[in-house]
Every structure is written in structure tokens, then in C-alpha cells.
Amino acid sequence: MPGDYYETLGVARDANKDELKRAYRRLARKYHPDVNKETGAEERFKEINRAYEVLSEPETRARYDRFGEAGVSGAGASGFEYGDMGGFADIFETIFSGFGGMGAQTTTRRRGGPTRGDDLRLDLKLDFREAIFGGEKEIRIPHLEACNVCNGTGAKPGTGSKTCGTCNGAGQVRRATRTPFGSFAQVSACPTCNGTGEVIESKCEVCNGVGRKQETKKLKITIPQGVDNGTRLRVSGEGDAGLKGGPAGDLYVYLFVESDKVFVREGIDIRSEITISYLQAILGCRLKVDTVDGKEDLVIPAGLQPNTILTLENHGVPRLGNPVARGNHLITVKINIPTKINAEERKLLEELAKIKGDSTEKGGLEGFLGGFFHK
């Protein structure tokens, strides 16, 4: 599990954008794999990038502050490799322009094209039988939907966008600074267009030019038979809407199954216990027992010993992906031996003891019955 992103960057939770950027630059310079060859530096570098990517964007930072890692799971560069610098190109060039011109080859590129939306995570509780037999479940998810007024463009209907006059469509601005160590070239996102290379002529009044808005959506999902704790379901295209017509992310539903008062699951088998009388154990009988399928007949053979496990085949959990195959229901049988009996019962049992050649003086009734069960 990732650590706290604020701790990763060494900043307070109320740190502003400039404080985040300074902390990121300092740590990225220290742990970049091209500079730091120590063991673990590359992993630390990835953690720093991930933390900055989440906290530097107001939307993802707000979700992280509210929901933690679950709120940004799948977002951005969770699978980030340091060779794919993406939106960090401007910062990398700033940091490494003094290391043998490492940033000099950075390709200027616009970031205003369609962008895939973030993936979302939802934790869903199921009761015991829902996990076994599956079915449809209605959920509600807050996510970003494309604005239906501007169709995700962010522009007021009837208007469009134009090339940014500050960066001439590059999405980046370059500033040279002279220092005692030589020239220092700093490339950063254009403050006018925020790195897109375009500016909207007139912002959509509904989404304020963002192109997306927060909505809570009802959704029906199908729970397969046989799911268990930690099963992950992927619902394609139900994450956040993309920017500028980009595809939506996916929704990942993590399932958590509540325990049951009667049944315990072990893989695809189900276990439970029943208690019968000593007479039922001695003579044998047929009982109705609870299963996940309802009441079922269970045959108790005569002379059953305590803690014997009886099996009801094909009354367990359907195998995930192959619901025709089911596990078994394993029933542990407990036997209730009374500590007190009435006079008539004692007389009958003493007669039985004489027939079997056992004396009740050798440990009393419990000793007699215990001897019977283990013969």
C-alpha cells in the first residue's frame, strides 16, 4: 500500500501549489535514477512522482483528501515509469538542465488533446447469500460526466477555442536565467492556457469551461455467482469522463462479504454445526437442516460418534466462472448428553446397561453413554 502522499513529499496537508512544486523538485533531483544509483532510488522516485501528480491537480487532491488512495486508485500514472515523463516534462527540464543538458532534448508538446478520464474505485458490501448466488445490485457513484451543454468542450455553445497568444500554441513557456553557474533554462506550463495551447473564447456557463461536472449516477451491476472477499469487478466506461472528448475511465468494484451467523465459507465449501440428542445419535434418524438452498434432509446413521462430519454434496458455493460446479456443505454433528434425567429414564437406561454388561457405578450415566459412543 502506498504511504501518505503529503509525507512522501514532506509537506503539510495545507501546502499550496508552490510549496508542493518546490518539494517535488528537491526530491526529484535527489532521487532521479539518472543521478542517484543507490538501491531503491528508482522506486522512491516513482513514489514522489505519483504523490506530486495526485496533489498538484485540485480535483485529484480533493478526492485524495476525502477518500485517500481509494479515491484516486487508477488515476494518472499509477503505473508510471520514469522514462515516460508526460505532464512533468516542464519540471524535469528545469531540474536537470544543469546535469549535462539532460533536459535540453525535451520535446515541446501541447497537452490540449483528448485525455482519458480517471478510473474510480467503489467498495461494495454483500451479504453471505448474495456472494454465493450473485444477482443484480444497484449502486450510486459520484463521478465526473461530460457537460451536456458544451459536449465536453468547455466552450459556450456557438463559440470555440483559439490558439493561445502567450505560448503560440506550444502549451509551454521558456525562461532563461543567468546564475553564477551558467544559464539556467526553465520551462513551465503556460499560465494563460494551463498547458493546453488553446484558450476558450467564451466559457460554458454550466461547467465554467471545465467540460465536465460532478454528478451522482445510479448504475446496475451484475454480481457473478461465487464471488468472495476481495473479488474485483471492472465496469468499463463508468469512471470519470475524459477531457476534450477523451474516453471515460473504468469503475472498479471491490467486493466485501459479510459473515453469516450459521454458515462459514471455506473456499467453495460451506461449514455449519448441528446438535442432536444422545438418543438420536444412538438410534439414528432423519433431520431437516439449514443450508444456503433452504431446508434439506440429513440422514443421521445409528451409533453416530460426536463431532462426526456429514456431507451434503453440491450444496456449497458455485465455482466462480463455472457456476454449474458447486462445493459441498460439511456439517459437524455435536451430541447433547444430559447431566440430569428423570426416574423413568434412569430406570430404562440402567436396564440397558445391564443388557450391555455395563455398570452405572463406573462413572455414572455419562460414563455409560460415553462408553457406548466409543465402542
Image (cartoon, rainbow, N blue to C red):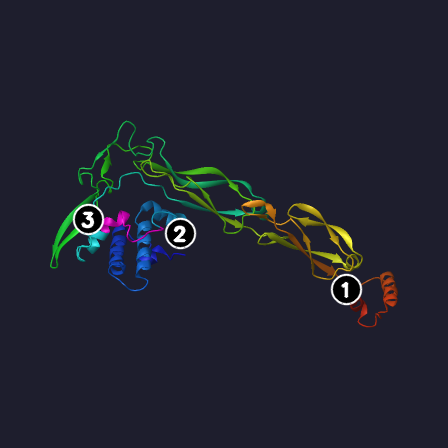
Q: Say whether disc 3 or disc 1 marks the residue closer to the N-terminus.
A: 3
Instruction: Read off the residue under disc 2.
Output: 69
* Quadrant hosting residue 294: top right
Q: Is residue 14 visible?
A: no
x%, y% of residue 41? 30, 61
Instruction: Read off the residue under disc 1.
Output: 373
Residue 192 lies within the magenta run: no
x%, y% of residue 27? 27, 58
- Specify the amino acid type for callout 2: Glu
Between 127 and 80, the residue placed more toward the observer is 80
| Callout 3: SS | strand
Q: Is residue 243 visible?
A: yes
Contact (Cβ within 8 Å) of mark 3 with mark 1? no
Name above or below for residue 113 compared with residue 353. above
**Dividing the image into 4 quarters, which one contains the C terminus?**
bottom right
Q: For this view, does 150 lie left or right of residue 187?
A: right
Between 220 and 247, the residue placed more toward the observer is 247
Residues drawn in magenta: 78-91
